Each structure stands twice: as C-alpha cells, then as structure tokens.
C-alpha cells in the first residue's frame, strides 16, 4: 500500500517542480530586464517635452508664397453641383449631388468663371466663398469651344474680391506658377510648380483646345475651373484638364490661357454666347496623293461675298493638267499654327473675333502662299 501511494503522488510532485522552475525563470527574466541597461525601466516619471529649436525667419520665397495665398485665395470659390433624379419605384423627383469643382470671382457683380465641364450635366449649382458662405448660382452663358462657363451669384459686394488679371502671351517655360482650388473637395488647396510647356493642343473630349498652358503644379479632380497664377498673384490660366492614366495627378496639367479667357468672358456676359468669326468656306478632310495623306484641309466651296471669297481663296476642282490632279486651295496653317482637320480650323478661328485679320498658309497646286483674311461675324449655320 505505501509503495502504491508513493507511486501515485510522484507525478504531482514533478508537476509542482516544473511550475516552480517556470516561475523562477520568469522572475529571472524580469530581474534581468530591470538591471540590464539594454532594457532598463519602461517608464520614466521625469520625462518632459523636448526643447524647441528656434527656426529663424522664413525664406523669402516662402514668405512670398504665403502672401500670394493670403491675397488671392479670397477670389477662389468652391462649386458644388446637383442633378435631378427620379426614383424608379416611387416616381418621386429629387436633387442629388452631381460633382464639385473650382472657380474664381470675375467681378464685383457676382460673376464666377469656371469650366463648362464642371456644370455641364448639372441642374443646379452652389458657390461657396472663402468665408464659407454659400449662394445659389445661375448660368449666364458658356463657350463650349474653350470649356469656359460664367455663373452669377447674388452676394454682397463686400464679400466679392475679383481676381487680378494677368497676361499669358509673355509666359515662359520654367516660370513658377500656382494653382488654388478644391481637389477632392479639399477647398483652399494651394499647389505650386512651373510652366512645363506652352501652346499645347489637347483633346478635352468635347473639343480640341489650342494654345493650352502645360504645368506640373498638382491638378486633381476638383481643381477644374480654378485659377493658375503667376508669382505676382495674377491669373494666367484656368485649370481645365490633366493627363493621367489613373485619374490622379501625374504632373501634367493644362490650363486655358488667360488672354483667351479675357476675350470670351466679356462676350458671354454681354450676350450669353460668343460672336464667332466667319471665314466663309466649306472644307474637306483626309486628302490623299500617291498613297500619302496630305496635311491641312481642302477648300471644297467658297461662299459668295465672304471673307474667304474676298481674299481670293479657290475651291478644289479636278484638273488633269495639274501635277496633283486638281486645282484650288488647301489650308495648312492659320497664323503659323498647323491644322489637320475641320475642328482644328474652327478651334483656331474661335480664338479671334470679327474684325480681326488672320493669315492663312495655303497650298495651291505646287505653290505655298500666305493670304490675309479679314474675319466677319459668322452668319447662323455657316463656317
């Protein structure tokens, strides 16, 4: 009996010894961590904030940028749009958020300039000023060829600070520029960069814009319609598009040049539309010779008593005696800018107004000629 009892209690005794060994090991580890300098105490009641090192004065360019933002941001607005949607089950009609964008105050009458694509699909728009006050906007008019729209709000004049207008004709690649807007609805956002290129031609989806300013200042969704500024805080362009494979900024943004904006906005305010210049020709694209596509557009028809007719342009006609198989004119450039389609031609013409004189480069047979044309107001339905 005693032998059996001794055998029965031996496992319990071994378990107690093992537990005691584990406890001793833990105590040893804790003592080691407390005494060894590598681990030391975890907490220190005497801990205090680090001493702040004085920064010194801000750099001159930083001060300049800060001042530019303070002076210009009150002229920049945030635009939210709404659209009407019908519930397919209840047939109830409701307004839903449609999108956001940026814009800027044009004058103290409450006119706001933005991109047409910001408000194109909207049934309503709200403009939020720099002091966070909001006003319903009405559409004054738009210019689809240059993606420009003008809205109007009824706000107290003391809240309206028109943006300072600059010039785009003397911009230079490498010049510093600034963009203010509401990317991803983060309003009052400032980004900086340089002018990366000038006189770019971009396809906005609805039109082809000539003469665009290219910049690497970060432009993202929501920046559309906001101002591009020079280092003096003057408007030099309206941010309108980005080149991106992901939808975010890749450092390639484009702006409508301010000289063009300053040309079309007064017309929109006066008439709600643009007085387009008229050349008076019907053109044909995709001319081929010996298997090669020719540059420019062919003049298919010259309208009687038109600017083109008075300038002596000639329509294309078959002519077996001609080296090219026809006689007549092919327009290859306007004011030194090459064209390759009817849309190119109309886009370049839209940068001028009736009464302006332009220079066409034409090919007539084997001759290259420069012809000056005095533009007139465009009759309805004509080119």
Image (cartoon, rainbow, N blue to C red):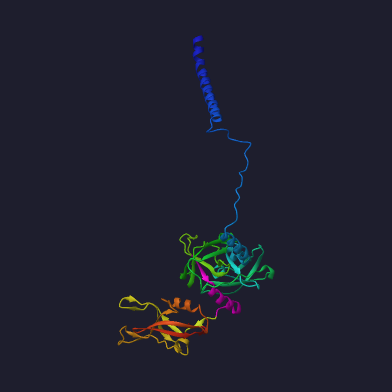
Residue 122: give x, y in percent of width and height. 58, 68
Asked whether residue 208 is in view, the answer is no
* Horizontal arrangement in the rendering, residue 347 relative to residue 72 (left or right): left
- Residue 318 image position (x, y, % from top left): 34, 86
Q: Which of 371 and 149 is in front in this view?
A: 371
Q: Main secondary structure of the magenta part?
A: helix
Q: Is residue 63 shown left or right of residue 289?
A: right
Residue 268 painted magenta: yes
Q: Is residue 100 magenta?
A: no
Q: Residue at x 61, y 62 (%)?
A: 67
Residue 309 seen in this snapshot = yes
Q: Quadrant of residue 57?
A: bottom right
Q: Return the residue found at the far front.
A: 56
Q: Position of residue 287 (x, y in %)?
A: 36, 78
Q: Which residue is drawn at 55% across and 64% down?
A: 179
Is 224 placed above or below 1 here? below
Figure label count: 0
- Which residue is at a point 47% across and 70% down the rendered structure image? 198
Taking depth in this image into account, of 326 and 352 the one nearest to the observer is: 352
* x 50%, y 64%: residue: 194
Residue interval drawn in magenta: 253-274
**What x and y, as percent, mark residue 24?**
53, 23
């Amino acid at each position: 009996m005693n032998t059996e009892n001794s055998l029965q209690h031996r496992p319990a005794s071994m378990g107690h010894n093992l537990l005691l060994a584990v406890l001793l090991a833990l105590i040893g580890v804790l003592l080691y961590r407390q005494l060894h300098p590598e681990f030391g105490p975890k907490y220190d009641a005497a801990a205090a904030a680090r001493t702040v090192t004085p920064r010194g004065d801000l750099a001159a360019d930083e001060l300049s940028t800060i001042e530019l933002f303070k002076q210009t941001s009150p002229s920049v607005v945030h635009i939210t749009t709404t659209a009407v949607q019908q519930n397919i089950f209840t047939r109830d009609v409701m307004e839903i958020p449609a999108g956001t964008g940026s814009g800027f105050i044009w004058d103290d009458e409450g006119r706001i300039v933005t991109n047409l694509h910001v408000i194109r699909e909207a049934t309503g728009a709200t403009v939020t000023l720099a002091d966070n006050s909001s006003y319903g906007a009405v559409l004054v008019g738009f210019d689809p060829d240059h993606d420009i729209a003008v809205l109007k709000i009824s706000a107290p004049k003391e809240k309206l600070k028109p943006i300072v207008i600059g010039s785009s004709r003397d911009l230079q690649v490498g010049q510093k520029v600034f963009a203010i807007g509401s990317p991803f609805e983060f309003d009052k956002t400032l980004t900086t960069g340089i002018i990366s290129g000038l006189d770019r031609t971009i396809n906005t989806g609805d039109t082809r814009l000539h003469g665009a300013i290219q910049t690497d200042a970060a432009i993202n969704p929501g920046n559309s319609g906001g101002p591009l500024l020079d280092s003096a805080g003057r408007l030099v362009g309206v941010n309108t598009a980005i080149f991106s494979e992901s939808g975010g900024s890749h450092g390639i943004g484009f702006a409508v040049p301010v000289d063009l904006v300053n040309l079309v906005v007064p017309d929109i305010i006066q008439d709600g539309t643009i007085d387009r210049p008229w050349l008076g020709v019907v053109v044909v694209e995709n001319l081929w010779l010996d298997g090669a596509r020719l540059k420019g557009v062919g003049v298919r028809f010259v309208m009687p008593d038109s600017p083109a007719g008075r300038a002596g342009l000639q329509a294309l006609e078959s002519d077996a005696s001609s080296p090219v198989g026809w006689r007549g004119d092919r327009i290859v450039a306007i004011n030194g800018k090459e064209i390759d389609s009817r849309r190119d031609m109309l886009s370049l013409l839209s940068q001028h107004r009736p009464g302006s004189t332009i220079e066409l480069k034409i090919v007539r047979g084997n001759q290259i000629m420069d012809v000056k044309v005095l533009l007139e107001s465009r009759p309805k339905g004509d080119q």
